[in-house]
Amino acid sequence: MSNSTSAYSLPFSSNTRGGFFKLIGLLLVAIGLLGMLVAAFGAEAVSPVLTGLGGIVSLSIGGILYIWEARSQKSVAEQNNGAWQNNMTARGASAWVVGVVLTGFYVLLYWYPDTLRGLTMAVEPISQWLRNRPADHWFLYGTFYTLAVMIMGVHALLKYRNSRYHIIRTISVIFFQLGFAFLLPGLLMLFNQPEFYFSYFWPLKYDYLFPGTVGYLVDNGAALGVFMVFWGAILSFAATPVLTYFWGKRWYCSWVCGCGGLAETAGDPYRHLSDKSKKAWQWEVAIIYPVFGFIIITTLILWINSWSEGRLLGNLSHGFSSTYGFFIGAIFSGVVGVGFYPIMGNRVWCRFGCPMAAYLGLLQKHFSRFRITTNGGQCISCGNCSTYCEMGIDVRHYAQQGEPIIRSSCVGCGICAHVCPRGVLKLENGPRDNRYAATPLIKRSDVNILS
Ligand code: SF4
Ligand code: SF4
């Protein structure tokens, strides 16, 4: 990697047309941030719709303009240049500022939502238009989340523009976030149906199989509510194993899931920050499977409690579900999972905490066709693959041996194959026969030139 030109460099020294548009983009972003700050702190004095919503629009247009110019001016081979030299993507001061702002936002969102009243009022027209009801802090969050996936989706589309796989994959995560996690739940509410996210299932959306939610959907959603419960159960216990058998966990983690969608778009500039050490892998195993076990036990206890009408376990089930919701649902998936992107990489939640990733990972490792095959004889040990693996897998180690990569944590993003200069890596779904077989390596000692 060269350190010549930063991916996010300021354009003031450039005389090109691109430099001018980058400057305009930055100005719009700055105006947008200012407007949002005014909406957040001065909603009483100035219309939050004018400042806040205007700010969001300005920031979105400016962000896309800047990204477009910054990315399209670079050739596909230069897209990762400067990743380790840039303050923003190499844990510099600006990265810490972004991390603190993101973490702070999640703290306000979960525990002090009143402080976001000004910004919530800013998205009121969108909420009325889409759902015909007042905006709340969760709608604000959904709007920000979806915008982040869309704007940084443009970034990913430009960055990986020479790869059909990554173009389709990026369009897929944008589609599922915008359609299934933002517009569809809003439209359901518009027609007075229960809010439901068809792209999330148990155990990630853990409460979808809790007796309270099942009862609520059946009682309030009539036939559609019954379908929602059926959909959730089928996706969790039938479709997930079948799809994972054929394609590994990538069908969900890198194509459908909203958490994965944010990681692959907004989090993409931080993917190289994932810890590749053995210690990190040990932490990963030590945390993610107990989290999965925790939600299985919580769900079972809730159902036992529901069937026994509280006589068997009393308040125990409530304690389990509220503990899980606080520590895993709020602190881990939100505050740490996204807030720590600029410091620990973009898949902290997926790697260490997501119960769905644990479930899919077990299926992928033991009951799937998916693997990444390595043509080890071609590997030049450059390490690009390991550097850009967001799940902290030392891909190069496997490539050097010619061994297939069959790891439960691999989300099948395919970036390791994309950045490999030698075409060593290939994501495959062929029959399981010889799945673990390594490609034969020709060693120096095997070649007898002078006999
Ligand atoms: S091994 Fe490759 S496909 Fe799997 S998570 Fe890492 S970069 Fe993505
Ligand atoms: S990127 Fe390709 S050539 Fe470089 S270490 Fe990885 S497999 Fe080997």
Image: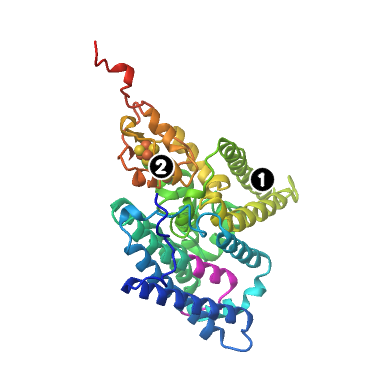
141 in magenta: yes
Q: Which mark is residue 6?
A: none
Q: Quadrant of residue 381?
A: top left
Residue displayed at 41% across by 32% down:
398
Residue 171 in view, yes or no: no
Do the CB atoms of the residues marked 1 and 2 lie less than 8 Å apart?
no
- Range covered by the magenta-colored residues: 129-145
Of callouts 1 and 2, the N-terminal one: 1
Tag 2: amino acid: Cys
Position of 317 compared to 399: left or right? right
Where does residue 360 sit, x and y in percent of width and height? 48, 42
Q: Which residue is mark 2?
A: 385
Count residues near mark 1 (Cα–Cα under 10 Å), then give few for <14, some for 14-19, many for 20+.
Answer: many
Taken as a whole, is the magenta stretch helix, strand or loop?
Answer: helix
Q: Which is nearer the eye, 180 or 279?
A: 279
Q: Quadrant of residue 397?
A: top left
Q: Secondary structure at mark 2?
A: helix
Q: Nearer the viewer, mark 1 or mark 2?
A: 2
Position of 400 compared to 35: left or right? left
Residue displayed at 32% across by 24% down:
441
Tag 1: amino acid: Ile
Position of 358 compared to 303: left or right? left
Q: Secondary structure at mark 1?
A: helix
- Asked if disc 2 is less than 8 Å from ligand 2, the answer is yes
Name of the residue lying farthest toward the top: 451
Name of the residue lying farthest toward the bottom: 45
Alpha carbon separation for disc pair 1 and 2: 43 Å
The quadrant of the rendering that contains the C terminus is top left
Position of 353 compared to 449: left or right? right
Count residues near mark 2 (Cα–Cα under 10 Å), then give few for <14, some for 14-19, many for 20+.
Answer: many
Q: Which mark is residue 301?
A: 1
153 in magenta: no
